Image: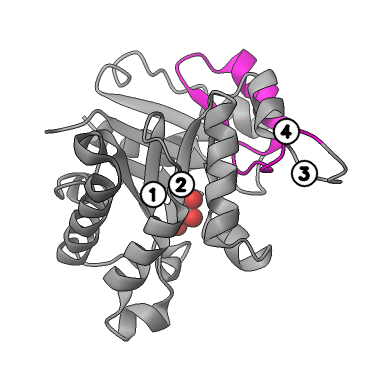
Amino acid sequence: MALKKLVAGNWKMHGTGADLAEVTSISLAAETAACDVALCLPATLVERGVRAAPGFAIGGQDCHAADKGAHTGDISAAMLKDAGATLTIVGHSERREAHGETDADVRAKAEAALAAGLQVILCIGESLEIREAGQAVNVVSAQVDASLPASSENLAIAYEPIWAIGTGKIPSMDDIAEMHGALRQRLVAAYGDAGNLVRILYGGSVKGSNAAEIFAVPNVDGALVGGASLKAADFLPIIAAAH
Ligand SMILES: O=C[C@H](O)COP(=O)(O)O
């Protein structure tokens, strides 16, 4: 069954109000019937995004597992919700690597976000060493098993091979199909039939030039886009390819 695709931009630590105005000048009137479009913004821009960007779902890039507390610099899922966000990323490889987040941490964050009423994009992916050792499917399957929250409602996952992020390299379409097929099996094992309704996004060097080919792969239900979501001229062709 084909799911409505989700094209989500992840701005990482990029972007000012002027950048937000530029990207959200895209008119989504034609596109949103065919796909959902989201921007996961730096916390400083979330509320402005909600006010200024009708048609875009606005999200955060991470949340703390706790509702509140003495966690300087962190932000809770409830705070994102209060700012008007409707979704958040959790478990991005940059957070797993730079902040030591474990599968258990990611699972706890996903649970907190779902409890706060946010949609979740839960990221998993393998390093180049693991890919070259032929262990990508095994490792990513184990990662997803250990990271999934109890409920699949409002959940999407994003397969992002770490070696493809920001490098211009992407896996072969056969490799993406193999991985997304394996992830679908893990989702069905975890949630039964509801696992077929969880969108599986691909992320890592998605561009206007490769988006249509990637979106045609079975079990690719959208994309998590980094660099190419920062400019309207780069992001719009990806959104258009999700028709
Ligand atoms: O979250 C987005 C990904 O890390 C992909 O980033 P990229 O499109 O710049 O390769």
Q: Could you tell me which quadrant the C terminus lies in?
A: top left
Q: Quadrant of residue 149?
A: top left
- The correct choice, above or below, for 183 with respect to 155 in the image is below
Q: Mark 2: which secondary structure? A: strand
Q: Is residue 204 visible?
A: no
Q: Mark 1: which secondary structure? A: strand
Q: Quadrant of residue 173?
A: bottom left
* Mark 4 vs 1, N-terminal side: 4
* Mark 3 vs 4, N-terminal side: 4
- Of marks 1 and 2, the one in the foreground: 2
Say which amino acid is labelled 4: Asp
* Mark 1 vs 2, N-terminal side: 2
* Distance between the alpha carbons at the discs numbered 2 and 3: 18 Å
Residue with the mark numbered 1? 158
Label of residue 122 in the image:
2
Q: Could you tell me which quadrant the N terminus lies in?
A: top left
Residue 183 image point, x, y percent: 26, 54
Q: Is mark 1 within 8 Å of ligand 1?
A: yes
Which region is colored magenta?
A: 40-68
Residue with the mark numbered 3? 74
* Distance between the alpha carbons at the discs numbered 2 and 4: 19 Å
Is 190 left or right of 205, judged from the image as shown?
left
- Extreme residue in the bottom direction: 133
- Of marks 2 and 4, the one in the foreground: 4
* Mark 2 vs 3, N-terminal side: 3
Q: Could you classify mark 2 by the number of other residues whose Cα lies within 10 Å: few (under 14), some (14-19), or many (20 or more)?
A: many
Say which amino acid is labelled 2: Leu
